[in-house]
Image (cartoon, helix red, strand yellow):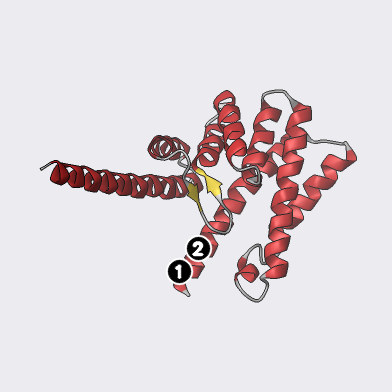
C-alpha cells in the first residue's frame, strides 16, 4: 500500500511540475506579445506570474532572455525604475550575456540619475546586441541569419548611438528614446523571425 501511495505521489509531483512549466512558458509568451503590443501592465502581470512559477525559465533559442529579464524590462517600461534596477541586476547575475537586459539596466540607471553607470551599461548592451547581430548575419547568412536585421536598420541605429556616446556629446533624451526603440525593436525582430520560421 505504501508503494501505491509513493507512486501516486511521484506521479502527481511530475504532473504538477509539468503543468507549472507549461503555464510559466505560456505566461512568458503571452507577456512578450503584450509587451510588443504596448500593453505593459498586462505584460507585467504575466511576467510576474511566470517568475513565481519558474524564476529560472529562459525564453528563446536565438535571443535568449530569462523571465527576470522580461520582468525587469517591463518594470522599466511601466516607470517602476527602482524595481526594474533590482530585477535587471538579478537577471544579469543569472545570464551575464543578456545584452537586452544590460541595455535596459543602463536606461534604468540613466533615468534614476546615475548617468555614468547608465551610459556604460547602455554602451555595453548596444555593443553586445550589435555584435550578436553581426555574428548571426555573418555566420548564418545563408540560413536563418539572413532574416535578422536584413536591411541593417537596427545595427545602423546602434552605430549612430555608439558614436554619440564615444564623442562625449550625449543627447540624453535622444539616447534614451533610441535605447527604448532598440529594446522593443530587437524583440520584434525575434518575433518576426519566429513567425517566418513557422511559415517555412
**In the image, 6: left or right of 197?**
left
**In the image, 164: left or right of 102?**
right
Where is residue 118 shown, x and y percent of the image? 73, 32
**In the image, 36: left or right of 134?**
left
Would residue 152 be seen by someone viewing this image from the given angle? no
In front of the other: 4 or 175: 4
In front of the other: 137 or 89: 89
Residue at which label 2 appears = 194
Residue at far left of view: 1
Q: Are marks 1 and 2 in contact (CB under 8 Å)?
A: yes
- Please, is residue 183 above or below residue 79 in the view? below
Q: Residues within 10 Å of mark 2 (few under 14, many from 20)?
A: some
Secondary structure category for the residue under label 2: helix
Residue located at (79% from left, 36% from top) = 171
Q: Quadrant of residue 50?
A: top left
Residue at which label 1 appears = 198
Q: Residues within 10 Å of mark 1 (few under 14, many from 20)?
A: few
* Quadrant of the snapshot with the N terminus: top left
Would residue 64 be seen by someone viewing this image from the given angle? yes
Residue at far right of view: 167
Residue located at (37% from left, 49% from top) = 26
Residue located at (79% from left, 52% from top) = 159
Q: Quadrant of residue 88?
A: top right
Secondary structure category for the residue under label 1: helix
- Please, is residue 48 above or below residue 82 in the view? below
In front of the other: 197 or 139: 139
Amino acid at each position: 500500500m505504501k508503494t501505491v501511495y509513493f507512486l501516486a505521489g511521484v506521479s502527481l509531483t511530475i504532473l504538477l511540475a509539468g503543468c507549472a512549466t507549461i503555464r510559466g512558458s505560456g505566461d512568458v509568451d503571452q507577456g512578450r506579445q503584450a509587451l510588443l503590443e504596448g500593453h505593459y501592465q498586462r505584460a507585467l502581470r504575466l511576467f510576474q506570474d511566470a517568475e513565481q512559477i519558474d524564476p529560472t525559465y529562459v525564453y528563446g533559442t536565438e535571443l535568449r532572455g530569462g523571465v527576470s529579464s522580461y520582468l525587469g524590462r517591463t518594470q522599466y517600461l511601466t516607470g517602476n525604475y527602482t524595481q526594474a534596477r533590482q530585477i535587471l541586476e538579478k537577471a544579469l547575475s543569472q545570464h551575464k550575456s543578456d545584452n537586452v537586459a544590460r541595455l535596459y539596466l543602463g536606461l534604468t540607471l540613466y533615468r534614476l540619475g546615475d548617468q555614468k553607470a547608465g551610459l556604460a551599461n547602455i554602451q555595453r548592451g548596444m555593443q553586445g546586441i550589435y555584435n550578436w547581430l553581426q555574428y548571426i548575419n555573418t555566420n548564418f547568412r545563408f540560413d536563418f541569419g539572413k532574416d535578422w536585421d536584413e536591411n541593417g536598420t537596427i545595427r545602423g541605429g546602434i552605430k549612430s548611438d555608439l558614436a554619440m556616446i564615444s564623442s562625449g556629446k550625449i543627447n540624453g533624451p535622444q539616447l534614451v528614446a533610441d535605447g527604448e526603440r532598440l529594446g522593443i525593436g530587437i524583440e520584434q525582430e525575434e518575433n518576426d523571425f519566429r513567425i517566418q520560421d513557422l511559415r517555412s
